Every structure is written in structure tokens, then in C-alpha cells.
Image (cartoon, grey):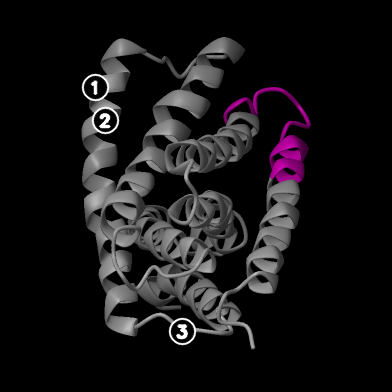
């Protein structure tokens, strides 16, 4: 199986899924593509810089300390990665005139998240092979999309609210919380059964993400 195709296919499926969920006023594909590539390169660059800084502030060791893995999951990984995506959505997509209804928050946050996930997935699949690619197609990639939807839901509300900062930050914190919870249970795999925690946290996130999509669809200003 072509490794590049294996790495990219789940990302493309999610992108098409979200594009089709934008039922009432499609976003221009060139602008979607720009957000995707900014997610792939700008977000990864920001993540790399912040990871180095925070790793020095919170020198996390890969040991069997639950507190160490908690810091690694929620701060060094989740907060850094979600903040990197958030920066792109907030300062590039959210300020653009194409961002003209709350559902667009979901669309653009997912585009940025999938850009990030695509590059990350390519790196992992080429390094670890087919089995990793198949596993991540059903775990890490959907997880990034889920976090993007949750963040985007609130960033969509923020764009058209007087409390823009409040809703933007809620979006960032919600995405960070679910990302951190998912990673935390994976990082403490030295404790039997913790994989179930990661699966449950992801399922809860997916359920909430689905509700977020339906709510913004229902309230679309372009709905006839």
C-alpha cells in the first residue's frame, strides 16, 4: 500500500465530510486550501517553537510518573498544538470576509486541524509503517478533526458575538481539554486498561462535535 496515500486518505475523507456538512453557503476552495496548508506548515512551525520553550520550562521525562505524563499531555502537547491551530484560525480565517456565519468556524478550524494532522500523519506513517497508518486513520486523525470542530464551534460563535475573546478562549480550552484527556490516557499506558479512557474521551468528543455541527447548521443565516 502506498504510504503517502495511507497517510493522506483519512484526512481527505474528513475534509470532504466537513465540506458537505456546510450545506447552505460553501466556502471557496482556494481559501480552504490556504487554511489547510497554513495548518500544515505554520501550525507545525509554531508547535515546534513552543514545544522547545515549554519542554525547558516543564522538563517532562518519559517515566512512569502520572503527574509528569499529565503535564506532557495537557500542556506540552495538547495546549501547544491546539494553540498553534487557534492562532491560524483566529488571525487568518476569522478575520476574512469569507468567514460570514458561525458554521464557518467549524469549517476553517477543521481545515487547519487537518493540515496539521496530514503533515503529522505523513511523518508518523513513513517512520513507523502501514500498521501505524491504519491505526491513526481511526484514532489520531479523527481526534484532530474532533478537537477542530469543538474549537471551531466556539470560534464561530465568537466572530458574531460581543464576547469574542470569551468564546475564542472557550474554544481553545475545550479543544485542549479533550486533546489532553485523549493523550493522557495513551501516555499512561503502563497502567492496564487506560486505553479505554482514551477511547471514551474520544467518543464523548465526537458526540459533542456532532451536536455542534447540527446546532450551527440549524442556526445558519443562509438557511432558506
Number of marks drawn: 3
- Quarter-of-image position of residue 2: bottom left
Tell me if residue 33 can be seen: yes
Q: Earlier in the sequence, mark 1 or mark 3?
A: 3
Residue at point 48%, 51% (across, down):
155
Q: CA distance from mark 1 to mark 2?
A: 5 Å
Residue 124 sits inside the magenta stretch: no
| Quadrant of the drawing holding the C terminus | bottom right
Residue 117 sits above or below residue 175 on the image: below
Tell me if 203 is positioned left or right of 91 in this view. right
152 or 73, which lies in front?
152
**Can you name the residue that lies furthest to the front here?**
162
From the top left corner, tell me how far across and down residue 180 is, in percent: 56, 33
Residue at point 67%, 59% (across, down):
212
In the drawing, what numbered circle is on residue 53? 1
Q: CA distance from mark 3 to mark 2?
A: 34 Å
In the drawing, what numbered circle is on residue 50? 2
Tell me if 183 is positioned left or right of 59 in this view. right
Q: Where does label 3 land, which residue? A: 26
From the top left corner, tell me how far across and down residue 106 is, in percent: 51, 62
Amino acid at each position: 500500500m502506498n504510504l503517502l496515500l495511507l497517510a493522506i486518505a483519512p484526512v481527505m475523507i474528513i475534509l470532504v465530510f466537513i465540506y458537505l456538512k456546510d450545506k447552505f453557503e460553501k466556502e471557496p476552495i482556494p481559501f480552504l486550501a490556504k487554511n489547510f496548508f497554513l495548518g500544515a506548515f505554520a501550525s507545525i512551525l509554531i508547535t515546534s517553537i513552543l514545544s522547545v520553550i515549554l519542554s525547558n520550562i516543564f522538563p517532562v521525562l518519559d517515566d512512569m510518573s502520572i503527574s509528569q505524563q499529565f503535564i506532557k499531555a495537557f500542556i506540552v502537547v495538547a495546549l501547544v498544538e491546539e494553540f498553534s491551530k487557534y492562532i491560524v484560525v483566529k488571525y487568518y480565517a476569522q478575520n476574512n470576509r469569507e468567514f460570514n456565519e458561525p458554521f464557518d468556524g467549524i469549517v476553517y478550524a477543521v481545515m487547519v486541524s487537518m493540515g496539521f494532522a496530514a503533515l503529522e500523519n505523513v511523518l508518523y506513517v513513513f517512520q513507523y509503517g502501514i500498521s501505524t497508518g491504519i491505526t491513526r486513520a481511526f484514532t489520531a486523525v479523527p481526534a484532530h478533526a474532533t478537537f477542530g470542530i469543538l474549537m471551531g464551534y466556539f470560534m464561530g460563535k465568537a466572530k458574531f458575538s460581543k464576547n469574542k475573546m470569551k468564546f475564542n478562549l472557550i474554544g481553545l480550552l475545550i479543544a485542549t481539554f479533550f486533546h489532553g484527556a485523549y493523550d493522557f490516557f495513551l501516555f499512561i499506558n503502563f497502567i492496564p486498561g487506560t486505553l479505554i479512557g482514551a477511547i471514551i474521551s474520544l467518543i464523548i468528543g465526537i458526540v459533542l462535535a456532532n451536536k455542534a455541527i447540527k446546532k450551527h447548521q440549524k442556526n445558519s443565516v443562509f438557511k432558506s
